[in-house]
Image (spheres, grey):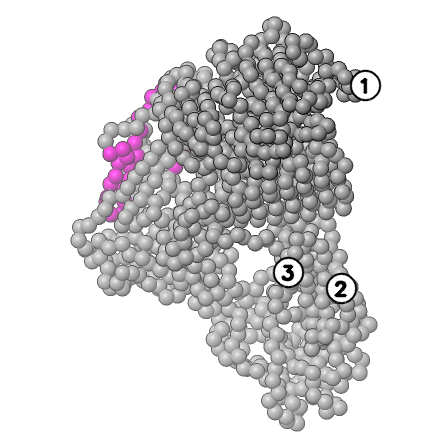
């Protein structure tokens, strides 16, 4: 199914317009559409094999619109090259997997740019996210790979509360561009410990929310990935003017994007167009795997040069071959020229050998040829990838003989090694093509392999001046004339192979690989090894033997730190981790966990850069009791370290019965008050049922601070406040709150997202005090709200009531002590002079729309109609302490997020914190990303 070139622009956001709604759909393509002023652009449930590409989303009512939403098992989806601007939530992925998000532009969103929850196995690459409240927000998700994106001036660049996601790919591709990254670039290499810059920051970029980092932050914004063209050619490879030639090329895009078009360009030997460019047929298929594009045409006689070109919808362009062109010969029946006595000498050599190519051209009419060429086609040469095109050289005229005019060329072979097929072709003045030898009888030459590994070095000193007290740097240069990256380069020392690390990326010129270690006194043997594809190279053929003198007895013991954290996959599964660092660059003989009298060897999980720190881990399933543990490490020179240096660590899991999930986690609660624009944040309301809270960590707009109470001065914009508490069992809990200050030109506004305190009128009204909606009190299942106005007039008050507090229809409203009747929208339209309200479930919450014939000043009371006579009933059963804390914890979230008052003359459009009711006590759950997500 295809949805293309439509304009979805009819819906008003508050009416719930959805541009495209799909449930349980397979094979859907949405391309080149415009979504404007819709409540939601695209919503998909349980879909698969879906492509959403090259669409435009925008909405001036950005506080009330959604872009692309993928829910509940949606998988195998590509979302690429879309522009999403000024939207409440541009892109949301919930309970889904197998999704690729690439080359999108997400900007000016009210809250999140890209929101991912309860999902796994997603790739997020080459997107641009700028001026959003959040760039990327990950929660309760795993296997999310985020790299090669640009994060530009988002209030919070990224957030990730998981531990199984990656924010960079392998070196040297690296991670993402962060506009607020302040690190330097003085070093290079996977460990960022080699002198010289490489365009990657030397220190990681921290991702708030958990223990996540972009380990290779790039310093310039990445470019959008382009496609590939390869395996291009023509069939048949020669013919006459009556032949129909079929041109073919394979198109592939790493993200599965279809091109706008693929063309084949045709010229004569002098670059003049022969025909208009041919548009090739691009079939439907998996563009990530590659599809074969074709075009068929007849051609005039002569040499025809051709190349292929593909263009994408966002401006990328790629050609094949990357430089130059391919060619074919179209014969005529009256050819007058021949090539004879062709030769190649020598027929065996190395890439540095000077090969001589020579042939004789003769024309019965005595005319010179338009060109004479030699073709070199690898048969099994190293470096020949699938679709490799023969190398073509034009020969020079040397002299005339009775055999004809001699053309020749002497040069080195550019191919690395292997067997190469050679033949000659010429074109006469009538554009007829002749060849020697005939097809199938070509010359075969052999180019011997050159050195792939060379120039071994060891420093300091040389191979004869080593001692056991000095850490040495062993290096080797790896060269590949085609620029291929090897699978690995290693050094074998005394029968043990160690992986070496690269210091550059130009493999055509050569990349130096290194390994740093110390050696014990005595004789040692080593050799180097590299693997590329199916080939393994060894250098040298004979082992290098070297002797190490006994040096001064200098050995720095390793440094060792460690700890434990709970794993995600099991209630009793814990991950013990340790970091090994050795100033002498000595590798460890062992890094060991000792727990309850047992020992476990730990495995490394990061690159073996001993001088900068290597992380080790082991995962154990533990019983519900107290455990004592410590770590030890021994380096290759006998250095020993224990962590902790004395005693043991204690992990107490005995606070719960075997049947219980785990020790009770703490609960984080934010209390706050506002003095003007100064926010006082208080975590003293946090608690732990089976222990005590030992640490309070605040993150305010990305700035870390600790302590039970902290202060923060507000400025214009959004302010994210997070509190993480940790108890004596090492368990943590977090809660968050958003403070917002409105922009100039819209009046000014301060409010707590999740609980509306006070609204105001337009800027033209003095000091913004025209229309007020003030939350006066919350008690006994009631919310008391005041509405006042200076001028009066009819209006509408829109309230959002938290779904977990009051279920659909379980509310009652009174206006100045008199009940307000609940009517349908149609009934309300027929009774414009009677106060009334309607209830709508909207976006996971209860929306109450209150219609007032005037708003001169009223008190509105919202009450529960549950069976317990006005007491609010939570929607889920809980433990006794939840009921005890219900009043202070849950009731404060009664009125949520936003109100609007629409009038004949003025429109309320913001929030203002009132002096009254300025304190908020209870867990700050009123604003939660999950509240806005369709389950």
Q: Which residue is mark 2?
A: 278
| Residue labelled with disc 1 | 830
Question: Marks 3 and 1, Cα distance to the nearest angstrom?
Answer: 63 Å
Label 3: which residue?
318
Give the crowd class for mark 1: few <14, some 14-19, many >=20 residues within 10 Å: few
**Residue 878's spot in the image, x, y percent?**
52, 13
Viewer-side label of 2, 1: 1
Tell me which residue sits at (41%, 26%) in the image.
Answer: 725
Q: Quadrant of residue 137?
A: top right
Left or right: where 232 falls relative to 528: right
Say if residue 91 shows up in the picture: no
N-terminal label among 3 and 1: 3
User: Which residue lies at the image location 74% right of the left edge and 53% below the top edge?
Assistant: 283
Report x, y in % for residue 421.
60, 72
Foreground residue among 266 and 364: 266
Q: On the rendered structure, is 543 left or right of 438?
A: left
Q: Can you say whether 655 is above or below 221 in the image?
A: above
Q: How many numbered marks does the figure carry?
A: 3
Q: Is residue 53 magenta?
A: no
When asked about the image quadrant of residue 292, the answer is bottom right
Residue 671 lies left or right of residue 81; in this view the side is: left
Q: Quadrant of residue 689?
A: top left
User: Mark 2: which secondary structure?
Assistant: strand
Q: Depth check: 840 or 296 in front?
A: 840
Q: Residue at x 67, y 86 (%)?
A: 361
The magenta stretch spans which residues? 617-645
Residue farthest to the bottom, as pictured:
402
């Amino acid at each position: 199914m295809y949805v293309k070139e439509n304009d979805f622009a009819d819906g008003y956001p508050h009416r719930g317009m959805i541009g495209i709604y799909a449930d349980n759909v397979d094979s859907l393509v949405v391309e080149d559409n415009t979504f404007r002023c819709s409540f939601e652009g695209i919503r998909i449930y349980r879909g698969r094999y879906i492509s959403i590409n090259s669409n435009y989303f925008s909405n001036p009512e950005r506080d009330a619109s959604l872009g692309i939403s993928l829910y509940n098992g949606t998988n195998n989806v590509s979302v690429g090259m879309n522009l999403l601007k000024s939207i409440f939530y541009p892109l949301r992925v919930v309970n889904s997997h197998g999704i690729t998000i690439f080359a999108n532009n997400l900007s000016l969103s009210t809250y999140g740019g890209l929101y991912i929850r309860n999902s796994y196995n997603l790739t997020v690459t080459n997107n641009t996210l700028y001026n959003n409240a959040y760039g990327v927000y990950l929660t309760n998700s795993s296997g999310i790979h985020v790299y090669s994106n640009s994060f530009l001036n988002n209030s919070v660049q990224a957030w990730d509360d998981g531990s199984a996601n990656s924010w960079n790919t392998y070196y040297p591709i690296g991670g993402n561009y962060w506009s607020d990254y302040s690190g330097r670039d003085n070093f290079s290499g996977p460990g960022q410990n080699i002198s010289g810059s490489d365009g990657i920051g030397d220190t990681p970029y921290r991702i708030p929310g958990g223990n996540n980092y972009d380990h290779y932050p790039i310093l310039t914004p990445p470019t959008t990935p382009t496609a590939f063209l390869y395996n291009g050619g023509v069939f048949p490879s020669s013919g006459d003017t009556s032949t129909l030639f079929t041109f073919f090329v394979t198109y592939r895009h790493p993200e599965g994007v279809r091109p706008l078009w693929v063309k084949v360009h045709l010229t004569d030997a002098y670059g003049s167009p022969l025909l208009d460019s041919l548009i090739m047929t691009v079939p439907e298929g998996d563009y990530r795997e590659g599809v074969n594009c074709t075009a068929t045409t007849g051609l005039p006689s002569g040499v025809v040069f051709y190349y292929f070109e593909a263009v994408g919808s966002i401006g990328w362009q790629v050609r094949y071959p990357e430089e130059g062109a391919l060619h074919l010969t179209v014969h005529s029946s009256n050819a007058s020229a021949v090539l004879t006595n062709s030769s190649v000498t020598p027929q065996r050599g190395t890439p540095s050998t000077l090969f001589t190519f020579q042939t004789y051209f003769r024309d019965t009419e005595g005319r010179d040829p338009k060109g004479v060429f030699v073709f070199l086609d690898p048969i099994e040469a190293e470096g020949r990838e699938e679709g490799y095109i023969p190398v073509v050289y034009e020969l020079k005229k040397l002299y005339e003989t009775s055999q004809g005019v001699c053309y020749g060329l002497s040069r080195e072979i550019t191919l690395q090694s292997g067997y190469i097929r050679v033949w000659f072709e010429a074109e006469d003045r009538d554009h007829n093509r002749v060849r020697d030898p005939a097809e199938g009888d070509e010359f075969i030459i052999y180019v011997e392999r050159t050195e792939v590994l060379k120039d071994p070095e060891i420093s300091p000193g040389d191979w004869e001046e080593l001692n056991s007290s000095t850490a040495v740097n062993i290096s080797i240069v790896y060269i590949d004339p085609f620029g291929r990256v090897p699978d690995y380069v290693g050094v074998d020392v005394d029968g043990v192979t160690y992986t070496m690390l690269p210091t550059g990326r130009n493999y055509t010129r050569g990349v130096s690989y290194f390994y740093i270690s110390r050696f014990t006194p005595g004789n040692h043997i080593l050799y180097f090894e590299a693997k590329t594809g199916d080939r393994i190279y060894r250098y040298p053929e004979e082992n290098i033997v070297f002797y190490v003198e006994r040096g001064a007895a200098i050995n720095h013991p390793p440094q060792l730190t460690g700890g434990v954290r709970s794993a995600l996959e099991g209630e009793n599964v814990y991950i013990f981790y340790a970091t090994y660092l050795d100033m002498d660059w000595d590798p460890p003989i062992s890094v060991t966990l000792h727990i309850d009298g047992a020992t476990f060897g730990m495995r490394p999980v990061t690159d073996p850069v001993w001088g900068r720190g290597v992380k080790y881990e082991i995962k154990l399933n533990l019983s519900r009791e107290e455990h004592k543990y410590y770590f030890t490490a021994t380096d290759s020179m006998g250095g020993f370290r224990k962590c902790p240096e004395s005693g043991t660590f204690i992990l107490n899991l005995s606070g719960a019965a075997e049947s219980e999930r785990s020790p009770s986690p703490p609960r984080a609660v934010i209390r706050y008050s506002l003095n003007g624009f100064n926010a006082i944040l208080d975590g003293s309301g946090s608690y732990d049922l089976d222990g005590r809270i030992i640490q309070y960590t605040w993150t305010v707009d990305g700035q870390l601070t600790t302590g039970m109470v902290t202060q923060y001065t507000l400025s214009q914009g959004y302010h994210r406040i997070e509190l993480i508490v940790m108890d004596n069992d090492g368990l943590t809990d977090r809660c968050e709150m958003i403070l917002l200050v409105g922009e100039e030109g819209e009046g000014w506004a301060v409010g707590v997202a999740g609980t509306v305190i006070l609204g105001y009128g337009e800027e033209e009204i003095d000091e913004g005090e025209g229309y007020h909606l003030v939350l006066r009190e919350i008690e006994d299942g009631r919310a008391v709200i005041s509405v006042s106005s200076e001028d009066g007039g009819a209006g509408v008050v829109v309230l959002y009531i938290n779904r977990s507090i009051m279920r659909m229809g379980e509310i009652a409203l009174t206006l100045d002590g008199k009940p307000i009747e609940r009517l349908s929208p149609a009934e309300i339209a027929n009774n414009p002079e009677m106060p009334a309200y309607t209830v709508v479930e909207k976006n996971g919450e209860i929306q109450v729309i209150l219609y007032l014939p005037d708003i001169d000043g009223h008190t509105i009371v919202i009450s529960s109609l549950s069976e317990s006579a006005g007491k609010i009933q939570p929607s889920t059963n809980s433990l006794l302490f939840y009921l005890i804390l219900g009043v202070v914890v849950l009731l404060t979230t009664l009125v949520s997020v936003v109100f609007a008052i629409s009038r004949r003359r003025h429109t309320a459009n913001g929030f203002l914190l009132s002096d009254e009711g300025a304190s908020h006590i209870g867990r700050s759950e009123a604003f939660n990303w999950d509240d806005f997500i369709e389950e």
